[in-house]
Image (cartoon, rainbow, N blue to C red):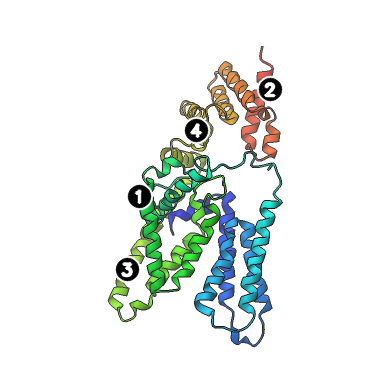
Amino acid sequence: MHPLVTEAVCEPTYREDLLVAFFTLGGLVLAMGHRPDAGRFEGWRAAACVACSLLAVGSKESGIAAPVAIGAYWLLVRRGERGWFWPVVIGVAKLAVLAFLAARFLLEPAPSKIFEAKPQYPGGSLAAALLIEPRILALYAQLVALPVNQCADYGLYSVAHLPLPVALIVVTAVVVATAIAIRADPRMAIAAALVVAPLVPVANIVPIYRAAADRYLYLPMAGVGLAAGLVLTAPWLAGRERLRQRLLAGAAVAVILLAVACTERQKVWAGPLALWTDTFQKNPVAFTAASGLAEALREAGRLAEAEQAARRAIELSDGKRGDAWATLALILDGAGRSAAAFDALDRALEVDPRLANPAARVAALALERSYADDLAALEERRRGRP
């Protein structure tokens, strides 16, 4: 019901976040179903838990949360049980996950046919990224509690309202509150594991392509939901029926409000124009937003606005992105300004000669076919110009 989950659901290419959550939670539920009094070792259940852990990390690196969550559950709830089930499941799942991650980074082909440029640290270095990360974590905390400034492309502009001292206060407050909650109800540690573990791979300790994203919170939101459920069933509520009823009423109101916000957020992902208009409004210094908006406006036939967005994308990239120049060329051509379109295309090919073969860019998943067809037609006319 939370609007933070809509990005992973509405955008098909983010299905990895759905899969990692499915297999992580599936493995945990399977492990919880173990019955030590069955009189035999549940090999099928152990194998299924290990398989879920492997499939989780195979879906996305945040799948490291699978063995962590199972281990936290065993430690807090089932530690007194005898037998080989828990040592086998937790030990083999950890080994499987670590082996996959080692293969993932050591055997990765280079260069990638899809991601041609290597990811960079936010701020340009590890030291700068470590100073930015508390601001990102504080942004996540704010988005969970008050999802009012969601964006499909977060950047430094997105954390401008959270300077480092404020961010450190927010993060510290969350850590202290979590520690108090775990002390009051040790089961909260399972919820904390589901929140923290999936965030480790996207904490910018190693460079990633997006420093922050709503989809990174898809699995952690399961931990937030678990924490909310544990609050409503906390041991200290026993005998306090009036307080429990008030908490339940407050939770119901929160769910209704979040459901409305979730529905509204889905409208942003209804199409390219809605998405990139919203993104550019939220982060006007993002090249991706300006470039996407330019192309969406071109497809909608709003060429004057599209030209402004394309020139903004060129400005934000310091003129070093050939695709921005190519989009401008297509916009100018659509407006009947062929000479200016040819000049822009000349600049696009100068910056990125690979654009001379749009079909190859489609094969590399770097261009959409309709865009590539329009670009190829313009290039053919450019070659035949007087």
Residue 166 badge = 1
Residue in the image at 56% along x and 44% along y: 209
**Between marks 4 and 2, how big is the CA–CA gap?**
24 Å
**Between marks 4 and 3, how big is the CA–CA gap?**
45 Å
Residue 260 occupies quadrant: bottom left
Residue under label 3: 249
Residue in the image at 53% along x and 56% along y: 200
Check contact, mark 4 vs mark 3: CB within 8 A. no
Q: How busy is the neighbourhood of tag 2: few (under 14 within 10 Å), some, or many (20 plus)?
A: few
- Which x, y percent locates residue 92? 66, 70
Residue under label 2: 380
- Which tag, 3 or 1, sits closer to the chain's start? 1
Of badges 4 and 3, the one in the foreground is 3
**Between marks 2 and 1, how big is the CA–CA gap?**
55 Å
Q: Amino acid at mark 2?
A: Glu
Residue 106: tell me if it is visible. Answer: yes
